[in-house]
Amino acid sequence: MTQEQEQQLVGEIKKYVSDNLPLSKMSDEELEEKVEEIVQERVRGMYCSISQRVSIGQQVYSSIRGFGLLDSIIDDDSITEVMINGPKNIFIEKDGHLFKLDRQFESQRRLEDVIQRIVGLAGREVSQANPICDTRLPDGSRVNVVLPPISLCGPTLTIRKFSKTPMTIERLIRYGSITQEIADKLELLVRAKYNIFISGGTGSGKTTFLNALSNYIPKDERVITIEDSAELQITGVENLVSMETRNANAAGAGQITIRELIRASLRMRPERIVVGEVRGGEALDMLQAMNTGHDGSLSTGHANSTQDMLSRLETMVLQGSAGLPLEAIRQQIASAVDIIIHLSRLRDKTRRTMEITEVVGYEDGQIKLNPLYVFEEDEDSTLEKVSGSLKRTDNPMKNIHKLRLMGFTDNI
């Protein structure tokens, strides 16, 4: 049976099921069984392999109760990103490379139905009045939706998939992002309650790295996580409170921002505050939390370098409080942030840790940085393949007060 014949049969069976079965009264199991029976009946006498028969049944079922053709894409663990630009253009990312799928939704209406189902699962709303929405799938994958008339090519759906197994430092070492020696140093910094910021561009692995780093938090501490859409998978911490923002409803009411959640978290006796990503005015609240005894906070931000991350933090603080003098903002950043870890996606699509640097204070109107580890390419690097590693610089670590407080006497 050709692909075209298969899709035609799927359409026919779906129409028959929708027209003739009491779908609202049937459980998922009953519907699945009935679809299997109908598929067996329809393919009798045709040449149809067992795998095709199973595929037809799954496509019919998922188009009624699941996410349609998205189900098979979401189930494929090798796919890391899904980009849907209207019903006819579906792109996926595998191993850092983009491909266009030769499959499409039956209609724009069908794609809109799938979007409403995804958004509804997390209790969110998206409509023409509120056409942009950030949400997540039940497995934690991050979802962004933009509807017409904002999106001119039709409903746009972007899914950043997350591994079903939480990212650990061990896996980062296996992938070559860091070495065991650096991992041991990072564990010390997390346990000693250094405030750590992870910076990098889109797709550089900031959330993944934050997730791995957060698993170094001692298991007996109270941890509050704050995110736009819950993605972090912190394991082993029993005293864990996870909070996520909420968009305004159709009437424009009920919005809960990261700023409000950070302020609320300060009244919840946190020992650690982990903010998934700082994007705007909430940066001021985050810095104030770090400066008022909530050491050991972790967060991420978009930037092209460690120096750029500081500039972006300044801009974000000004978004939240335009009247603050720049000098006061820089002093606030210099005293709040201890360590910046910069990640990058290189020309061969690999994700690497590019720099680990400490913020050593404010001097002559500037925030001073002290690079501890810097990524250096070696002679095996080519235009197609990057080879290299993080190298320790000659700069001694200056901000060692917290290490001494935890009883660590050596230098990093």
Image (tube, grey):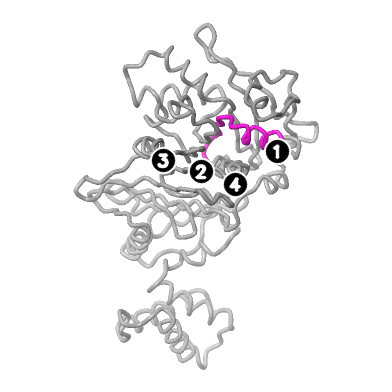
Report crowding for label 1: few under 14, some 14 to 19, many 20 or more residues within 10 A (C-alpha).
Answer: some
Please say whether residue 198 is one of the residues in the magenta stretch. yes
Q: Amino acid at mark 4?
A: Lys
Query: Residue flagged by tag 1: what amino acid is it?
Result: Ala
Looking at the image, do the residues carrying marks 2 and 3 touch, with CB atoms under 8 Å apart? yes
Judging depth in this view, the residue of 176 and 153 nearest the camera is 176
Q: Is residue 238 above or below residue 198?
A: below
Residue at position x 72%, y 40% in the image: 385
Which amino acid lies under the numbered mark 2 shown in the image of this protein? Arg
Identify the residue at horizontal 51%, vertical 26% (top origin): 309
Q: Which residue is mark 2?
A: 222
x and y, in percent, of residue 356 in the image: 64, 28
Q: Nearer the viewer, residue 204 or 410?
A: 410
Residue hosting label 3: 268
Residue 182, quarter of the rendered image: top right
Residue located 70% across and 27% down the image: 373
Q: Residue 145 vs residue 58: left or right?
A: left
Quadrant housing the N terminus: bottom right
C-alpha gap between disc 2 and disc 4: 8 Å
Read off the magenta span: 184-202
Q: Choose between 176 and 48: the one closer to the eye.
A: 176
- Provide the secondary structure element on which disc 1 rests: helix
Are dots 1 and 4 in contact, CB under 8 Å?
no
241 relative position to 116: left or right: right
Q: Earlier in the sequence, mark 3 or mark 1?
A: 1
- The residue lying at 37 percent from left, 35 percent from top is 263
Give me the disc on residue 219.
Answer: 4
Depth check, mark 1 against mark 4: the one in front is 4
